[in-house]
Image (cartoon, rainbow, N blue to C red):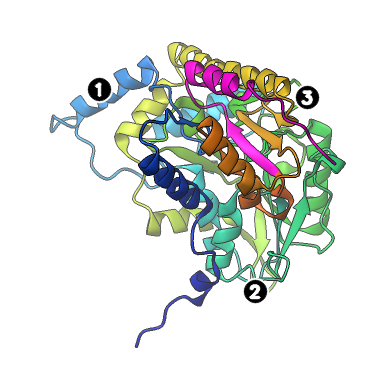
Amino acid sequence: MFRINDNFTLLAGNYLFSEVGRKIAAFQASHPEAELIRMGIGDVTRPLCPAAIEALHRAVDDEASSSTFHGYGPEQGYGFLREKIAEIDYRGRGIDVAPDEIFISDGAKSDTGNIGDILSVACRVAVTDPVYPVYVDTNVMAGRAGLPTSDGGWSNIEFLPCTAENGFVPELPKTDPDIIYLCYPNNPTGTALTRDQLKVWVDYCLAHGALLLFDSAYEAYITEDDVPRSIYEIDGARECAIEFRSFSKTAGFTGIRLGYTVVPRCLKGVDSRGERVALNPLWNRRQSTKFNGASYLSQRAAEALYTPEGCRQVAETVGYYMENAAIMRAGLAGAGLQAVGGVNSPYLWIKTPDRMTSWEFFDLLLDKYNIAGTPGSGFGKAGEGYFRLTAFNTLENTRAAMLRLSSHLFTNKK
């Protein structure tokens, strides 16, 4: 018989959000009359902005004529979009990023999972705890995580706790990892790191020869001046960091799928002989082999986001969700619940009341208040006793959810 990849058998049976979806489906089946408000999985509710819709229509018309038809596109992404990204997202903010360092993809989730293809399975890994599950699970699949440990971790992954005690700011690793994942503004806690705090990590990576995988999918939600929009705002980051970005939460592209990854040409690792090797051509080779390029339609829609109208419309959408976040912060506080986040991100991280576990609080919100969220324990050991809500619902539903919670004053027993 053929052999399977044993690493997959080490994973939990259900991906976190699949398990949440299963429980919600079971609740709806037994309570068809309930008006459920979903504030768990980070999908968006606002439609695509008019500039993107108009660009999509034009792109569809292009496909209807032999003179403008587009089939397979460049695996790295079309030049018209890569150049706009370099110009507006980076050079316009004083950041040195060239178009050929930008790789368009079908989303940041794919790229943060696939980036391990160009890295040795012998690399040691560090992640924050709580953590976006994809970072851990894809390293398990690759065989880089080692074996499960008795405390729910992995033998070759160092977990860096982010708790109320340390202000949700992770301490530097103790095991000298080769790869470090950071997501800021953070999913799931909704917290952010300042310029000085991020410099500590860049300096660490430069000193230890570590690769920083920086997920900035939520950079558009940053409101505070001292929180960088890009890791490349930090001196030295081009020599140690890869940045991942997404149009999903920024412009509502969760359905049409688009993101991009920046791999600086000067970023180098070492091969088994100890010789320095640039990562940019390795990622280019990986994408050219395993990826056929993002849709022409999606890329034309993204290009339109960089027009004056598109920029304004995206800002309006982000503002809409951040208004939801402000309503949630006030509503949660009014209900006696302690929460962080919602200032530089669309996520709020709630301390569960009355010593409840994360899943107990999930059940309470679902059964009593008909509100669906995400148990913090699904994001790691340090997430136990916490709960994530998102601001991606409608304004009306957000207000309704907070009104439901205000009917009961929670307490936090120590």
Q: Nearer the viewer, residue 349 or 144?
A: 349
Q: Earlier in the sequence, mark 2 or mark 1?
A: 1
Disc 2 is placed on an element classified as: loop
> Disc 1 designates what residue?
57
Q: Is residue 413 magenta?
A: yes
Q: Earlier in the sequence, mark 2 or mark 3?
A: 2
Name the mark nearer the viewer: 2 or 3. Answer: 2
Q: Nearer the viewer, residue 382 or 362?
A: 362
For label 1, count other residues whose C-alpha is less than 10 Å away and answer few (under 14), some (14-19) or many (20+): few
Could you tell whether 102 is left or right of 389 in the image? left
- Cβ atoms under marks 2 and 1 closer than 8 Å: no
Q: Nearer the viewer, residue 409 or 152?
A: 409
Disc 1 is placed on an element classified as: helix
Q: Can the viewer see residue 176? A: yes
Q: Amino acid at mark 3?
A: Asp
Q: Amino acid at mark 1?
A: His
> Disc 3 designates what residue?
226
For label 2, count other residues whose C-alpha is less than 10 Å away and answer few (under 14), some (14-19) or many (20+): some
Q: Is residue 303 magenta?
A: no
Report the magenta residues as a range.
386-414
In space, the residues marked 2 and 1 are separated at their CA atoms by 50 Å
Q: Quadrant of residue 202?
A: top right
Q: Residue at x 34, y 88 (%)?
A: 1
Q: Amino acid at mark 2?
A: Leu
Residue 164 image point, x, y percent = 82, 40
The correct choice, above or below, for 190 with respect to 214 in the image is above
Disc 3 is placed on an element classified as: loop
Q: Which mark is residue 147?
A: 2
Residue 108 image point, x, y percent = 51, 43
Residue 236 image point, x, y percent = 76, 42
